Amino acid sequence: MFSMLDGLTGTKTPRPPQPGVWAPMPTFFLPDTEELGEPRMCTVLLRYVLTWKTNIPTFRRHMVSMAEKKMGIVVGGSMGEAHHCTPAERILLVQEARQALDAADMTDVPILAGTGMGSTKATIELTREAVNAGADAALVIASGYYAGAIAGDRKALKKFWMDVCEKSPIPVMIYNYPGASGGINLDSDVIEEIGREAPNSCGVKLTCGDVGKLTRICATVAVPSFAQLHPRDTQTPFLVLGGFADFLVPSVFARGHGAIMGLGNISPRVLVRCWELAQEALRDPTALEAAQQLQDLAARGDRTIALAGISGTKELLNRLYGYGGAPRRPLLPLSATEGQELWDHENVRALLNVEMELEAEAQRVHEKQ
């Protein structure tokens, strides 16, 4: 009998996450069943299901396209509707991501896999399974189910990430997203303490939108003395990443390391160019104006699209590329009217116009090579 473990790539060569801009991959479901695929036979460990009719090729195609455009890859994050996926589905997506990248000759591209679960034990177990599927680092959010009990318990919150870091065979990134964790919102002191005391921690994603917190953390972890006093198990500094596109350029000047943004699925060229120009502006101030112009577009577009949620991102993917589909219920797709309003919104049009210009420019460069 076929085993889902057959062909799992594992992680033989370390591929730690690096500074830059990252896109959390959406999960694409079959339209009639909301499944990743239709089951054919049960397999390994009473958990995994081999599938035949799937939307996995769409997932693989989109992810490779993002990686080709220099976006980092996150699988099983909030944009990927991880909370609405089974553990088996989440592992399958990591496996397919690694295989797709390897097949596209992008074996050096790391995969950051969302592995947060309800308990510390379940989170560690899923993280270990993700390693076997090809994950290079784990993005871990706290469960919000018992937020009433632990949101104000600094000791419990810190111990959660310390325990996961200790037991994880791959680096662990803290995912601070109050909107998806029952309001749990780590302060900068706790995040810095984890960074100092857990050598297997590799950074934090701040989807709290607190730019002051980002600046404070960078002031601690992004200076040379931090790395000297607190050496890491990972081959990368403790990364401080934003969770939106609206502070990308300023974060560079605060010593930030980039961002993980759902907008990356819609405008990867704009965000990569914005990041590159911001980096250049550190050395050459004349690049700052161009970086700010793209930052303005991204900030306005990000807010407009973020207000439409996962459904809005999938609606735009449908219109841009012919795939995206609907989210898994209870999330609902946008209505026809809502979808048209989003598509026609001046912030979206302005952003996509520049995205298309940069895409055409990239195609011209490619054709000359």
Image: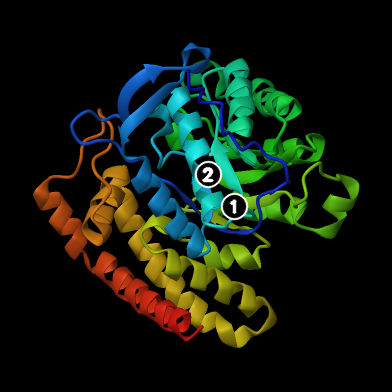
The kind of residue tagged 1 is Leu
Residue drawn at x 51%, y 68% is 272
Residue 50 in the image: above or below residue 263: above
The kind of residue tagged 2 is Gln
Residue drawn at x 72%, y 49% is 238
Residue 187 falls in which quadrant of the image? top right
Report if the CB atoms under discs 1 and 2 are less than 8 Å apart: no
The residue lying toward the viewer, choosing from 235 and 105, is: 105
Work out which residue is located at the far left of the displayed protein and give it.
Answer: 337
Circle nearer the viewer, 1 or 2: 2
Q: Is residue 205 left or right of residue 343?
A: right
- Residue denoted by label 1: 241
The residue lying toward the viewer, choosing from 324 and 52, is: 52
- Residue denoted by label 2: 99
Characterize the local packing of mark 1: few (<14), some (14-19) or many (20 or more) Cα atoms within 10 angstroms. Answer: many
Residue 337 image point, x, y percent: 9, 51
Q: CA distance from mark 1 to mark 2?
A: 26 Å
The residue lying toward the viewer, choosing from 119 and 6, is: 6
Residue 325 image point, x, y percent: 24, 44
Q: Is residue 32 left or right of residue 155?
A: left
Residue 232 image point, x, y percent: 82, 44
- Of helix, strand and loop, which one carries label 2? helix
Question: Which numbered disc flags the more N-terminal residue, 1 or 2?
Answer: 2
Residue 86 falls in which quadrant of the image? top left
